[in-house]
Image (cartoon, rainbow, N blue to C red):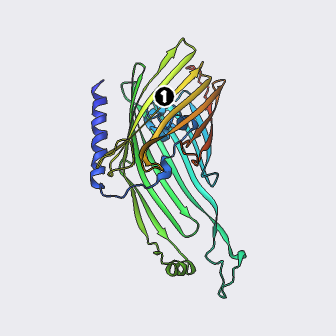
């Protein structure tokens, strides 16, 4: 590896850990909707794609990988439902190559629960129930990602970054704006791929403001609930490490396994490797392909310790599976079955995504696919 690769890693780590030290006492779990994933390919592999992703979804997983996109322009759309259809999760992204060494991407994520009944006014002044007073509202979380990726002088090494805007809204009662940065590094060594991706490397700040009507404040007071006040919510950095290897089997068959480690720095979490302040959440997956047309994917992750009905502690994990098909190197349709657990009451989600390659005509050079 050349010096610029080592230098990049050192700078990355210094920036990342400097922000962690400053905010090491911040509470856990903020902006969790931004961790659900993007693209059915990734979800089928238990989100183990930080090193191997090389398409428009790199804007979400690791912006350094965008420059390896196989076409000049890519568009991807994804939809899934959670909690038996109560919540909708949607993702859309478009990426374009600026030249052979750089690319840009815009991604949008929405996680929302719609048609929530507001029953604050259901009882009138005489104590009667009036169903006509029920109105509905939505609780939505939105993320906008602006990505840039570039190869270094060494074509095997690339860098990338995201600027992101968070907008969260709960009816007309509350909303929050947030801003943060992500960064990533990717390195290819023969058939091996190595990656580092830092989410919220500067920490992401959400500023909440509330505008509750008087009748809602009265209900909060009568029921003993605290009336929310304007506040700031901080999302701490997460470091993702990925290693992948590509195998070609008799030309027609390919196999690409990957291992990822998610490192958090806010104290003990219910992960496979827990510590204070660092906890590590490992997950792995693979993609098997035939002639780059048909793909089968699987992965395991979300290792946790739980107590069963006999009072014994057990380690559980979440398996995921998925399939994909590419039509004439232009359209890819992917499917993933995720949130599968060994508990019979576990909910699962069907995830679908479609990706379209668009190539600009260039008389001076052939189109890359």
Relative to 118, is 17 above or below?
A: above
The residue under the point 28% across, 39% down is 11
Q: Nearer the viewer, residue 269 or 250?
A: 269
Q: Residue furthest front?
A: 310
Direction from residue 94 to residue 229 in the image, left or right: left
Whether residue 56 appears in this view of the structure is no
Direction from residue 331 to residue 67 in the image, left or right: left
In percent of width and height, residue 249 lies at 52, 14
In percent of width and height, residue 58 lies at 49, 36
The residue under the point 54% across, 11% down is 250
Direction from residue 112 to residue 66 in the image, left or right: left
Q: Secondary structure at mark 1?
A: helix
Q: Quadrant of the N terminus?
A: top left
Which residue is denoted by mark 1 in the rendering? 68
Q: Nearer the viewer, residue 211 or 369?
A: 211
Q: Nearer the viewer, residue 65 or 153?
A: 65
């Amino acid at each position: 590896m050349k010096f610029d690769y080592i230098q990049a890693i050192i700078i990355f780590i210094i920036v990342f850990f400097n922000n962690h030290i400053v905010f090491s006492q911040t509470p856990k779990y903020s902006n969790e909707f931004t961790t659900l994933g993007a693209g059915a390919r990734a979800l089928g592999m238990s989100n183990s794609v930080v090193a191997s992703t090389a398409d428009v979804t790199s804007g979400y997983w690791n912006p350094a990988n965008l420059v390896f996109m196989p076409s000049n322009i890519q568009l991807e759309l994804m939809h899934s439902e959670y909690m038996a259809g109560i919540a909708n999760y949607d993702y859309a992204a478009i990426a374009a190559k600026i030249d052979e060494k750089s690319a840009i991407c815009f991604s949008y994520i929405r996680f929302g629960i719609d048609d929530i009944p507001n029953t604050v006014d259901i009882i009138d002044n005489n104590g009667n129930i009036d169903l006509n007073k029920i109105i509905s509202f939505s609780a939505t979380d939105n993320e906008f990602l602006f990505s840039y990726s570039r190869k270094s002088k060494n074509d095997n090494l690339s860098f990338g970054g995201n600027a992101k805007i968070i907008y969260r809204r709960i009816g007309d009662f509350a909303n929050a704006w947030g801003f943060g940065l992500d960064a990533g590094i990717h390195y290819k060594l023969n058939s091996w791929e190595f990656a580092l991706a830092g989410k919220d490397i500067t920490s992401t700040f959400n500023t909440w403001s509330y505008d509750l009507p008087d009748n809602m404040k009265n209900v909060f007071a009568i029921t003993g609930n605290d009336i929310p006040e304007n506040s700031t919510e901080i999302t701490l950095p997460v470091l993702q490490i990925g290693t992948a290897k590509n195998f070609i089997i008799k030309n027609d068959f390919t196999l690409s396994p990957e291992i990822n480690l998610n490192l958090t720095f806010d104290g003990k979490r219910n992960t496979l490797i827990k510590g204070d302040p660092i906890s590590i959440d490992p997950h792995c997956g693979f993609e098997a392909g035939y002639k780059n047309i048909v793909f089968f994917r699987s992965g395991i992750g979300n290792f946790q310790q739980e107590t069963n009905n006999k009072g014994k502690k057990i380690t559980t994990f979440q398996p995921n599976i998925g399939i994909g098909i590419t039509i004439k190197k232009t359209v890819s349709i992917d499917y993933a079955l995720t949130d599968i657990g060994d508990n019979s009451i576990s909910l699962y989600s069907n995830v679908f995504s479609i990706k379209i390659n668009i190539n600009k005509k260039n008389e001076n050079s052939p189109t890359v696919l």
